[in-house]
Amino acid sequence: MPSFLDILTEALGLILSWERALSEIVILSLRVTLTAVVISCVLGLPLGAMVGAFRFPGRGLLTVILNALMGLPPVVVGLMVYLTLSASGPMGALQLLYTPAAMIIAQTILVTPIVAALTKQVVEDLHGEYAEQFASFGLTARDRIAALLWDARYSLLTVALAGFGRAVAEVGAVLIVGGNINHVTRMMTTTIALETSKGNLELALALGLLLLGIAVIVNASVMALRASAVRATYA
Amino acid sequence: MRDMAPDTSLAMAEAPSATPPILATRALCYEAGGKRRIDTVTLSIHARRRTMIMGANGAGKSVLLRLMHGLLKPTQGAVLWHGQSQSAVARGAQAMVFQRPIMLRRSARANLKFALGARGIRGAACAEQAEQGLAMANLSDIAHSPARLLSSGEQQRLAVARALICKPELLFLDEPTSSLDPASTQMIEDLVNAAHAQGVTIVMVTHDLGQARRMGDDVIFLHAGQVAESGRLSDVLSQPRAPSTRAWLQGRLYTDATL
Ligand SMILES: Nc1ncnc2c1ncn2[C@@H]1O[C@H](COP(=O)(O)OP(=O)(O)O)[C@@H](O)[C@H]1O
Ligand SMILES: [Mg+2]
């Protein structure tokens, strides 16, 4: 049994040599997660902004649903997407199961409610401040949403980063719908789980360190963004 | 621009009721929190005049201003704009400056451009009018600064300029100088008087008797949600008839305690 130090040294070596076995996993992970986060923002930012800024029938219910969906267990989402995409499921004909697209779908379902619910909170607060001025300007609904999203841009960037943080670290859903197939659907998290169970600790630790690094960078970015926004009193 | 205002105010001080009012309310009522905050208010605002709205804290001045501008829906009664019921079109011809300026999280210039864009003014005209607004508010040097980093006096100047570049027929102001020092107050008064000299009708809530005397043509005194007294400012101040107005002028009425 090699010592922890040996494993760490080998893991660092793997990272530094940036071998294909490692790099393709990292790149696929980032591609899947970034795509899911972008789609989630395209859907979740306007949705959250509308719920935050307007009163309409069903608004309360929608808020409750969004908040509930925020806490969706990833494995349940994975199972639902699996059932939908499997050969006998309603969208089986698309043959998406065990592809990166399936993982993007699962992560999008996980992240969109997070983006929408956090956006709702941010926009609701800002709208409380702006509402009378906007009414005085006679703004259309579309212009209101656009202005609120723009003026909340710093807070919303941190919202997107929160969604990214959740998606990149998630393992259950992508494992179920992606299947962790070598060279096709191996994500950082799923590979860590697999390689650890196989005893291939060097690769697992290398990916773990990279994941940790990404988490640190994301959190540092959030803090730096907040600080610069506060300095310009844009927060 | 400072010395123009008194002349025009004199010229326009004649017979306000001769022309139909630019804005009028008919038996306006507004209820909130289970109470009548505005109670059967019927009044007229005359074009090209400066009407001061005065009264104790909680008398309903801010609520009345919001009702007249269409930001609040009356429980009963109506607001008439040029004799027609108040609409979105009417609001487009009005502008409002709030007690605490509401600044977008953008530069001073971008705040002006946003207001112009909301009125459908874009492109070169937008850029040009924004520069005029900055010059008007004496903020050209700090046009690129985040608006919320400006001092409260600068923010309020920007808010007034932002309202005026949209060329409103009527400008509402809700205690625009209540938290400003005398120099900033003077600059706001100059901006408002210059706009008035160019034909903008002014409706301003103020607590400041000196300011009312400097600027007002007409006055409306509110007491507990009702019009206690209204008319030419000089007449009302020299011979107040309502007990609440007299009490207020003597400094005895600081709250909405019933007389
Ligand atoms: N939405 C509301 N709900 C309950 N009370 C309100 C509401 N809006 C205003 N009021 C009350 O109505 C009264 C008049 O308010 P306001 O017009 O702001 O007074 P002021 O003359 O000082 O501007 C105050 O007593 C205020 O607390
Ligand atoms: Mg008030």
Image: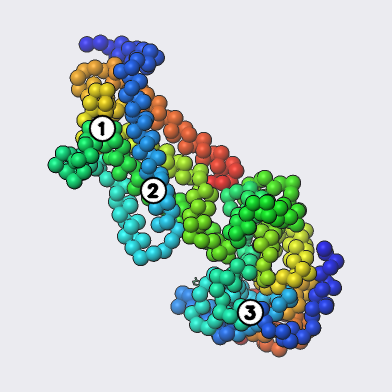
Q: Which residue is mark 3?
A: B82
| Tag 2 subunit | A
Spatial CA distance of label 1 from label 3 is 66 Å
Residue A160, position as x, y percentages in the image: 42, 41
Q: Residue at x 29, y 35 (%)?
A: A101
Nearer the camera: disc 2 or disc 1: 1
Marks 1 and 3: same chain?
no
Can you see residue B103?
no
- Say which quarter of the image contains residue B99: bottom right
Question: Mark 2 is on which residue type?
Answer: Gly
Quarter containing the N terminus of chain A: top left
Q: Quadrant of ligand 1?
A: bottom right
Characterize the local packing of mark 3: few (<14), some (14-19) or many (20 or more) Cα atoms within 10 angstroms. some
Q: Is residue B235 above or below residue B214?
A: below
In this rendering, do the residues under marks 3 and 2 share a single chain? Answer: no
Q: Give me the disc on residue A44.
A: 2
> Which is nearer the eye, B152 or A97?
A97
Amino acid at the residue labelled 1:
Thr
- The residues tagged by marks 3 and 2 sit, at their Cα atoms, a distance apart of 44 Å
Q: Position of residue A35 (x, y in %)?
A: 37, 36
